[in-house]
Amino acid sequence: MDRTAGSRGRCHETATVRIARASLHQWEEPCLSGERGSGTVFFTGCPLGCVYCQNYNIADGTNGTELTSEQLTDVFLKLQDLGAHNVNLVTPTHFVPAIAPALERAKELGLTLPVIYNTGTYETVETLQMLEGLVDIWLPDFKYADPALAARYSNAPDYFEVASAALEEMVRQSRNAGRNSAWEKDLCAFDLDGMMTRGIIVRHLILPGHTEDSRKVLRYLYKTYGDDLYLSIMDQYTPLPHIATLHKGKYLELARKVTQEEYDEVVDYAVDLGITNAFVQEGEAASESFIPDFEHFDLETSLQP
């Protein structure tokens, strides 16, 4: 399938970049959002097909504005002008061939913010290699260890193998970047205000009824990388209204939030493993307030200082 010729791939998109939102976002990890917000750019489409997707109305291609690579560069620079702590590329995988030159151009024109690659981690090593030297912070999901769950919920039975190889490449690039800094022994680096400037935060979203798979994911990550990278253990799964009726009730087990007992079980397991570099969530995280408004977004007015 040739997306450059106008065909739409698994991601629902052609090769033409579309974004659904660009704005300051306060709902990332504290070392990314800070006080001013992360400069998020939400790309339309997604290479995964998660049935519980929180951003389903952009992942399926419903909402989005077409941009050239040059216009995307301008978006990055405008986010910097707005005071963003970083430029945060959300679900960018399928547009990397256009994003890479846009970032190179932005850096030539004065972009100095750390660049975050915020991804579902279902991508090839070759795709990530196109970003060598352009990404400072990797923010990958690690969704599943069990191929049956990955097949059922994301139509990706090979997810674990693909995500493991992708994460390994992210670690390689981050280590290479660290060799040129005063903190070369550390995979992650922070400034004096506690904001991350380089490194990796691996996110894992706990799904209701699947704490055993969450334990497998954490065990793999810690046994493989120890505390060299940071983990973010998330309980913000939000059962959107359509999940109860999707495919005639096929996914009814996902029509509820994660319980406090389930979340505590996974966090306690992380502690027992010896994990120390981790973000955890407190309070009512499972809320649609985390989900930005994509349907009523206007790019021009949102990026005005």
Image (cartoon, rainbow, N blue to C red):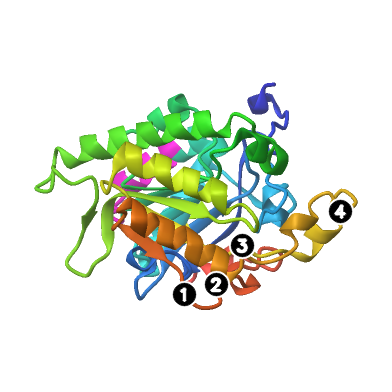
Q: Earlier in the sequence, mark 4 or mark 1?
A: 4
Give how far across and how far down residue 58 sits, in percent.
68, 53
Tell me the distance, in whole angstroms, between the alpha carbons under discs 4 and 1: 30 Å
State which quarter of the image contains the N terminus.
top right
The residue that appears at 55% across and 68% down in the rendered structure is 261
Q: Earlier in the sequence, mark 4 or mark 3?
A: 3
Earlier along the polypeptide chain: callout 1 or callout 3? 3
Question: Does the magenta-highlighted stretch encompass residue 199?
Answer: no
Instruction: Tell me if label 1 and label 2 are in contact, CB under 8 Å.
Output: yes
Q: Secondary structure at mark 1?
A: loop
According to the image, label 4 marks what residue?
249
Q: Marks 2/3: CA distance?
A: 8 Å
User: Which residue is located at x 66 percent, y 35 percent?
Assistant: 148
The residue identified by callout 2 is 285
**Residue type highlighted by circle 4:** Gly
Residue 189 x, y percent position in the rendering:
21, 53
Judge from the rendering whether residue 54 lies leftward or rightward of residue 143; answer left or right.
right
> Which residues fall within the magenta stretch?
100-113
Question: Closest to the observer: 285 or 170?
Answer: 285
